[in-house]
């Protein structure tokens, strides 16, 4: 079986050079590609409300505005990503001017973020959508090769996947306050992910589907990493007396982790291709040695969300202050990312200091943009009246009439309600396409058709589950 080409594999000298001028450019380019899908969500939020369409039609429109561009800009339309984002920014400025959104925002009594804010819904949906598109698109010739995962050092689009999943997992998690919380977190969250990891490893071994050992190791995979991160993060958070202590906990762990990578030659050990994989530790060194870094991301974003949502009812002045603080944090994170590029490098395979800073920069930037665009601007002009995710979580009965009012964020809300189901389905469909449709032999037009059908099937399933208010996982 041909091994999937997950990585951009440059010459050895380039692969081991962590202080490249290209890395920071890559990090910004990755953000731009994410913004193309984000722009589609913004446009669909405005149009679905303006057109007053039914939920099924809103889904079709959102698919055309969100999923189709997201697929095009990682394949044949990749040269135009920046142009598209600039165009969407100009459209947003025109929208703000024509609707007098700033005046409406200034006159609002309160900004109610709710228990599940729009920015959280959007960020989680972005993570699922971009990952689902890329895990299949990468097997087609039309996929833009530089977006593949970096072999050792780099900040490409697909390097963001696992980091974003860890960050969004943390955002809907909380500190283990007692043993009951810890047990619930381990049994209901960590254990199922680890079991899924076991199932994936077993299944690809049985069918002989190739897996690159340099991703997480010979036996580990993304499910294992997420499950073990949840497990370790929950245990560490159990020893924190309050949410504020999670910040120093994560900082200390990050310093120790980076010192091990830099001064104990852990990074060299992980990246040395001459080391055989005869022992279990050697075979899975990529995933195991990256775990502390992912736990840092997990702990930090539990703390960060507690800070961000410490007050969900904000006055106009408080909202402006929150936006200014987020802007400061975003700029600081990007500055630290730039410093990291020329000191320790950015490496997903070890989840080092540079990678952690890059993930902080991307996530905080997207939180800032989402809070500003949706909660501050759009909701001031066309306020939302209904959140089905909150209704399901609170056990509130949802009527068909109230359900039809929710014609915005259809795909985003569906992905939030059944994100794991969507991700599992995307993995199954990816395996099906690779085994039966021979993607490496397809033309660009056929490749795009297969990708769009694949995304339509995956999103359509979770959309119908969402319509019936069925939450699986």
Image (tube, rainbow, N blue to C red):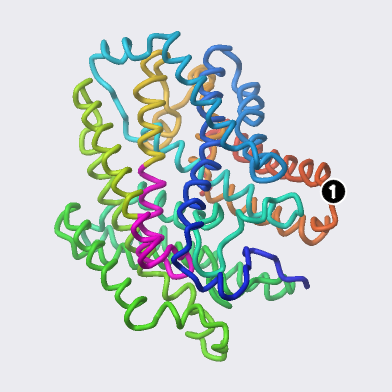
- Image vertical order of residue 298 relative to residue 1, above or below: above
Specify whether 168 is left or right of 104: right
Q: Residue at x 56, y 18 (%)?
A: 48
Q: Residues within 10 Å of mark 1 (few under 14, many from 20)?
A: few
Which residue is the site of mark 1?
Answer: 443
Residue 359 counted in the magenta span? yes
Residue 7 counted in the magenta span? no
Q: Residue most toward the front?
A: 21
Q: Nearer the viewer, residue 364 or 430?
A: 364
Q: Which residue is drawn at 37% across and 67% down?
A: 344
* Quadrant of res 320: top left
Specify whether 113 is left or right of 52: left
- Image vertical order of residue 462 relative to residue 214, above or below: above
The image shows residue 144 at horizontal and vertical percentages of 67, 51
Q: Residue at x 45, y 62 (%)?
A: 226
Q: Which span is picked out in magenta?
A: 337-364
Question: In which quadrant of the rendered image does the N terminus lie?
Answer: bottom right
Q: Overall secondary structure of the magenta stretch?
A: helix
* Quadrant of res 9: bottom right
User: For the residue labelled by badge 1, is the local secondary structure a helix, a strand or a loop?
Assistant: loop
The image shows residue 51 at horizontal and vertical percentages of 58, 12
The image shows residue 235 at horizontal and vertical percentages of 28, 67
Q: Nearer the viewer, residue 176 or 285?
A: 285
Q: Residue most toward the left?
A: 241
Q: Residue at x 52, y 70 (%)?
A: 152
Q: Nearer the viewer, residue 191 or 197?
A: 197
Q: Which of 357 and 415 is in front in this view?
A: 357
- Image vertical order of residue 467 relative to residue 94, above or below: below
The reply to whether residue 157 is visible in this rendering is yes
The image shows residue 301 at horizontal and vertical percentages of 32, 51
């Amino acid at each position: 079986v041909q091994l999937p080409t997950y990585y951009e594999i440059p010459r050895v000298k380039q692969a081991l050079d962590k202080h490249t001028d290209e890395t920071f450019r890559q990090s910004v380019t990755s953000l731009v590609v994410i913004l193309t899908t984000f722009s589609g969500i913004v446009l669909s939020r405005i149009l679905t409300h303006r057109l007053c369409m039914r939920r099924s039609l809103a889904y079709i429109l959102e698919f055309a505005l969100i999923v189709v561009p997201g697929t095009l800009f990682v394949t044949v339309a990749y040269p135009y990503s920046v142009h598209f984002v600039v165009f969407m920014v100009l459209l947003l400025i025109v929208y703000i001017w024509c609707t007098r959104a700033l005046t409406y925002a200034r006159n609002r009594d309160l900004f109610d973020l709710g228990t599940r804010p729009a920015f959280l819904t959007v960020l989680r949906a972005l993570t699922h959508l971009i990952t689902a598109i890329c895990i299949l698109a990468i097997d087609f010739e039309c996929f833009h090769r530089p977006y593949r995962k970096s072999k050792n050092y780099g900040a490409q689009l697909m390097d963001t996947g696992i980091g974003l999943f860890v960050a969004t997992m943390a955002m809907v998690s909380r500190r283990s306050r007692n043993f009951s919380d810890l047990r619930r977190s381990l049994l209901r969250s960590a254990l199922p992910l680890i079991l899924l990891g076991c199932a994936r490893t077993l299944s690809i071994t049985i069918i002989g589907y190739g897996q690159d050992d340099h991703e997480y190791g010979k036996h580990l995979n993304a499910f294992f990493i997420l499950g073990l991160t949840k497990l370790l993060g929950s245990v560490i958070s159990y020893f924190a007396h309050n949410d504020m202590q999670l910040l120093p906990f994560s900082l200390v762990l990050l310093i120790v982790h980076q010192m091990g990578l830099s001064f104990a030659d852990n990074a060299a050990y992980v990246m040395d291709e001459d080391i055989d994989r005869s022992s279990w530790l050697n075979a899975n060194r990529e995933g195991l040695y990256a775990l502390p870094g992912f736990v840092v991301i997990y702990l930090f974003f539990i703390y960060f969300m507690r800070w961000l949502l410490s007050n969900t009812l904000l006055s106009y002045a408080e909202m402006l202050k929150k936006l200014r603080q987020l802007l400061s944090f975003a700029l600081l994170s990007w500055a630290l990312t730039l410093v990291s590029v020329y000191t320790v490098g950015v490496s997903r395979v070890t989840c080092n200091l540079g990678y952690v800073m890059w993930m902080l920069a991307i996530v905080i930037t997207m939180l800032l943009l989402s809070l500003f665009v949706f909660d501050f601007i759009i909701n001031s002009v066309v306020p939302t009246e209904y959140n089905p995710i909150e209704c399901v979580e609170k056990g509130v009965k949802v009527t068909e009439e109230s359900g039809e009012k929710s014609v915005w964020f259809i795909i985003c809300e569906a992905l939030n309600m059944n994100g794991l189901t969507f991700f599992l389905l995307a993995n199954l469909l990816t395996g099906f396409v690779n085994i039966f449709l021979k993607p490496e032999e397809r033309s660009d037009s056929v490749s795009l058709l297969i990708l769009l059908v694949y995304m339509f099937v995956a999103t359509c399933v979770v959309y119908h589950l969402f319509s019936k208010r069925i939450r699986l996982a």
